[in-house]
Image (spheres, grey):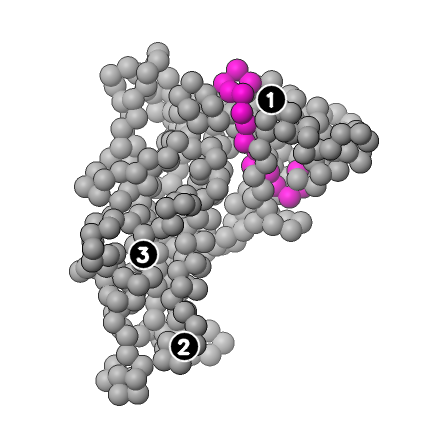
Amino acid sequence: MEDYQKAGIQFDPLEVARTIGQPLDPRKPFPKLVTAVCNTEIANAEDHTFYFDALLETDKVLVITANGEVVQENVTIDTPVQLTFIDLASPEYYIKLTEWATRKEDVLARKNKTINRALNSYETYKVITLLDAAATTAGNTNTLRSGVTRYQFTDLIIQLQQVQQYGDKYVMPIGADIWKDIVLWDFDDNKFHSPLESLKALDVELVRISLGSGAAQFNLGTGPSGGSGGTTAATDILAATTSYLVATDTEMGKPLLWVRKNLDQVKTLGGVIAEDGDEIQRVIFASPNPVTVTGTTRYLAIAMTGWEQIAAAVVNANGISEFVRS
């Protein structure tokens, strides 16, 4: 490291972590889908578990366990279910030491956006996982009707009938193929009414997940945190042929619960958050020494990884409907 310090290519990993790991934008603390379909809570740093208590008769909830699986738990009055916090970690990202030494723009800000985008993708994927499990549990799964080749307005009404008892306002995460079908409703089915007006009249808000003509993807690790450990595989956040209809004003509020933990200052781990005591929900760890990265060429770089802890559950599976356009 001394040769690089003499050349002016020195860095302080704690300072890197402090600079890049600032509190999230308070105007947009959660990804769009999490905000749209989840009741969001923030747990204290010292909390190791989060309890959800039922206000009605015996009920069932779907929770994400420490190994990333979704399981069903029974909840009764005065017998709350315990939600376990799980780790979410981004892949390991790199800043070349040559870029760091000759930077003409804020490379840390750019990597910060990349890490937050990765963690947001993981959070959105976990929400989709819960929506899928909820629709299956409730029996609210739908496919193309006989003789039909696309998602039609009638299919939306069928989904509304399945969940209308649990709300008057709805959020609809959609894949690229479903979005295309909806956009073409006025051309294929109704020549006089726009899809936007039809959805507005039913109080349905579309949330596009897919990009372009295919499914939005991210690299999901084989470990339970989805981070850089083990092998990674390109994974669809939401299949292009799938959509969900979510009633968002149920008797218990939105049908999903999403909890993110505040994290203490972690100086000894190389993840300093803020000297002024502000707690944040995501930590950035920077490598204490330059690492050698091997790709098409070898280079020295600073390695950075994002990390957070979340707990999540479906508190009303009946308010969720799924449609798969095969």
**Mark 3 surroundings within 10 Å by alpha-carbon count, few (fewer than 14), some (14 through 19), many (20 or more):** some
Q: Along the polypeptide, which appears first: circle 2 or circle 1?
A: 2
Residue 312 x, y percent position in the rendering: 37, 35
- Residue 320 in the magenta stretch? The answer is no
Label 2's element? Answer: loop
**Residue 106 vs residue 296: left or right?**
left
Question: Is residue 148 shown above or below 290?
Answer: above
* Residue drawn where x is 46% and y is 48% of the image: 121
Which numbered dot is residue 160?
1
Q: Which residue is mark 3?
A: 22
Q: Amino acid at mark 2?
A: Arg
Question: Is residue 66 shown above or below 23?
Answer: above
Q: Nearer the viewer, residue 6 or 78?
A: 6
Q: Nearer the viewer, residue 309 or 249?
A: 249
Q: Which residues are magenta?
A: 164-178
Q: Along the polypeptide, which appears first: circle 2 or circle 3?
A: 3
